[in-house]
């Protein structure tokens, strides 16, 4: 095993995956949301950086090629599990997350079964776009938690009718309540649609890999 910068970045991404839910165990919100968002964004950036540096510096290793997809999947799957919990099993989040997790487990199992023939399932350009869409959607949904809890913090102690009047534009907004509510709604809507889009790409790439593997899954193959 070679310890170069690309491999260190990959290991960081792998370790960042379980660290995301730990943020919600040891910090109150919205601080936990901020820390989880920063950690996830930092790890997501290494997904591009480690591969780029490995190719540029000619430092590609077997260890890096093995660990890179594992780190990607761990980061996405664990972050999705956290979001499903944070959004209280909201179907808008739960169903795309289920599709993504199912596909990742299925394709990983199929690669393991195929062994040497798994080279047929090398990452495609569409699969890279799939991973990018997943990470972007997750980041936006973590950001929604930040806006939501600042909005809640602003509105605590305020009269409910006054909040409704501020949001309706009938009363001057002196605390930034409407702005925070707007960003909360935007991040939830954009994040939800991005996650649905990512789920569609995930499903398409899963079917593509399955069709490529089908000739090697026939019983008449040695």
Image (tube, helix red, strand yellow):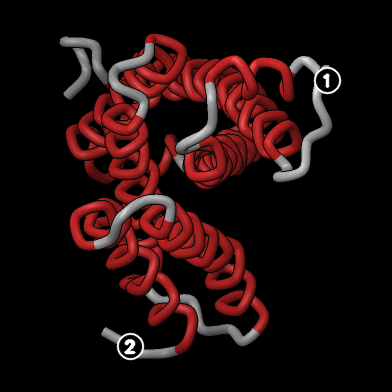
Residue sitting at x 75%, y 37%: 179
- Is 182 placed above or below 175 here? above
Indicate the secondary structure of the residue bearing disc 1: loop
The residue carrying mark 1 is 169
**Which of these two is toward me, 113 or 87?**
87
Query: Is 144 situated left or right of 64 in this image?
Result: right
Q: Position of residue 18 (x, y in %)?
A: 24, 57
In the rendered image, which quarter contains the N terminus? bottom left
Spatial CA span between label 2 and label 1: 60 Å
Total labels: the figure holds 2
Local crowd at mark 2 within 10 Å, few (<14), some, or many (≥20)?
Answer: few
Q: Position of residue 92 (x, y in %)?
A: 46, 13
Indicate the secondary structure of the residue bearing disc 2: loop
Residue 139 visible in rendering: yes
Labelled disc at residue 2: 2
Residue sitting at x 78%, y 35%: 173
Q: Position of residue 13 (x, y in %)?
A: 39, 65
Residue 120, picture quadrant: top left
**Which of these two is toward me, 156 or 82?**
156
Local crowd at mark 1 within 10 Å, few (<14), some, or many (≥20)?
Answer: few
Residue sitting at x 62%, y 87%: 57
Query: Is 87 situated left or right of 217 in this image?
Result: right
In the rendered image, which quarter contains the C terminus? top left
**Which of these two is toward me, 141 or 6?**
141
């Amino acid at each position: 095993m070679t310890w170069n910068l690309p491999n260190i970045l990959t290991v960081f991404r792998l370790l960042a995956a379980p660290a995301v839910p730990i943020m919600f165990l040891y910090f109150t919100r919205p601080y936990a949301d901020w820390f989880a968002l920063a950690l996830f964004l930092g790890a997501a950036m290494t997904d591009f950086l480690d591969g780029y540096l490995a190719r540029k510096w000619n430092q590609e290793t077997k260890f890096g090629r093995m660990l890179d997809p594992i780190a990607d999947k761990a980061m996405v799957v664990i972050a999705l599990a956290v979001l499903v919990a944070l959004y209280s099993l909201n179907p808008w989040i739960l169903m795309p997350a289920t599709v993504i997790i199912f596909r990742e487990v299925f394709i990983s199992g199929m690669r393991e079964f195929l062994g040497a023939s798994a080279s047929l399932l090398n990452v495609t350009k569409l699969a890279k776009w799939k991973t990018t869409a997943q990470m972007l959607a997750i980041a936006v949904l973590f950001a929604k938690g930040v806006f939501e809890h600042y909005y809640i913090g602003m509105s605590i102690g305020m009269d409910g009718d006054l909040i409704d009047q501020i949001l309706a534009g009938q009363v001057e907004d002196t605390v930034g309540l409407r702005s925070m509510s707007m960003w909360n709604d935007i991040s939830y809507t954009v994040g939800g649609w991005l996650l649905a889009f990512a789920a569609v790409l995930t499903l398409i790439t899963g079917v593509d890999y399955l069709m490529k593997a089908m000739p090697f899954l026939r019983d008449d193959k040695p």
